[in-house]
Image (cartoon, helix red, strand yellow):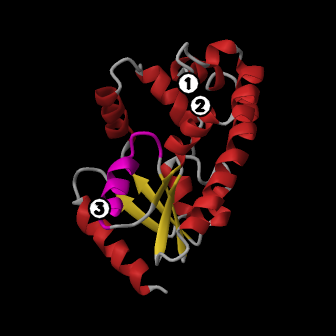
């Protein structure tokens, strides 16, 4: 089984790319949604998160208080590192279990916005970077999340590797700049991965 990692900065269009691969029948591990699920359901992770960030990290319905967490961790590098230090190992263990469950597939895709930053790229065979111009990425985020300010968006971007850094380490690059069709790019990669093993 070929393990493909896919990454891209906030607003790059990873979700759209993942939807296309999913429609092609490829198993997708969405690190963001699995991370959120684990943070809301894993008792040890809940305890560790509250210990680090306080009770306000969770809403009364036991859901993550994402705006509060983002405000805390993206304004404090040390806190961000500690937070990642408790979340990433849980997500890694969860993804390893998922790989085992999908071992009969030709290839699978693991999505992670922080694939390079977290070191998770070392556990995949190939990496796809989804890239888009910064201005377009900011515009996309503002459309989907009208409460988030440009300053907040840029703060998140500053914590992620830029496209140039990702392109250097990626095996494949998907240009999602709205000047090129995305589906043919994905179909070409799909064909490549099916033929590769």
Comparing 173 with 84, the one in front is 84
Q: Which mark is residue 22?
A: none
Look at the magenta stretch and give its main secondary structure. helix
First of labels 1, 2 by sequence position = 2
**In front: mark 2 or mark 3?**
2
Vertically, is 31 above or below 50? below
The answer to whether residue 70 is magenta is no
Alpha carbon of mark 1 to alpha carbon of mark 2: how far? 7 Å
- The residue that mark 3 highlights is 23
Residue 40 tag number: 2
* Residue indicated by mark 1: 64
Badge 1 density bin: few <14, some 14–19, many ≥20, Cα 10 Å: some
User: Which residue is nearer to you in this view: 171 or 81?
Assistant: 81
Please report the residue visible at 38 percent of the width from the left and 55 percent of the height from the top.
Answer: 18
Q: Position of residue 40 (x, y in %)?
A: 59, 31
Instruction: Work out how far the residue at label 1 is from the one at label 3, CA to CA, in angstroms.
Output: 29 Å
Q: Nearer the viewer, residue 153 or 104?
A: 104
Secondary structure category for the residue under label 2? helix
Does 168 sit left or right of 130 as displayed? right
> Could you say which quadrant of the image residue 87 lies in?
top right
- Is the residue under label 2 in contact with that under label 1 (CB below 8 Å)? yes
> Which numbered disc flags the more N-terminal residue, 2 or 3?
3
Cα–Cα span, label 2 and label 3: 28 Å
Seen at 64% across and 21% down, the residue is 75
Residue 157: x, y in percent? 51, 35
Between circles 1 and 2, the one closer to the viewer is 2
Which residues are drawn in magenta? Answer: 9-24
Residue 117 lies left or right of residue 4; in this view the side is right
Q: Earlier in the sequence, mark 1 or mark 3?
A: 3
x then y, percent, for residue 150: 41, 23
Rendered location of residue 7, percent (x, y): 50, 54
Check the picture and name the quadrant holding the N terminus: bottom right
């Amino acid at each position: 089984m070929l393990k493909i990692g896919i990454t891209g900065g906030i607003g790059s269009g990873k979700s759209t790319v993942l939807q296309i691969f999913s429609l092609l029948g490829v198993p997708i591990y969405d690190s963001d949604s699995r991370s959120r699920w684990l943070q809301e359901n894993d008792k040890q992770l809940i305890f560790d998160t509250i210990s680090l960030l306080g009770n306000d990290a969770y809403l009364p319905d036991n859901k993550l208080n994402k705006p509060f967490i983002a405000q805390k961790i993206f304004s404090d590098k040390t806190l961000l590192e500690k937070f990642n230090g408790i979340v990433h190992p849980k997500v890694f263990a969860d993804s390893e279990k998922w790989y085992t469950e999908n071992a009969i597939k030709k290839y699978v895709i693991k999505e992670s916005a922080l694939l390079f930053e977290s070191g998770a790229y070392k556990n995949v065979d190939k990496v796809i970077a989804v890239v888009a111009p910064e201005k377009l990425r900011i515009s996309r985020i503002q459309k989907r999340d009208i409460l988030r300010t440009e300053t907040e968006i840029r703060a998140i971007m500053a914590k992620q590797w830029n496209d140039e850094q990702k392109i250097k380490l990626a095996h494949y690059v998907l240009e999602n700049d709205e000047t090129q069709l995305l589906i043919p790019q994905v179909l070409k990669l799909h064909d490549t991965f099916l033929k590769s093993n």
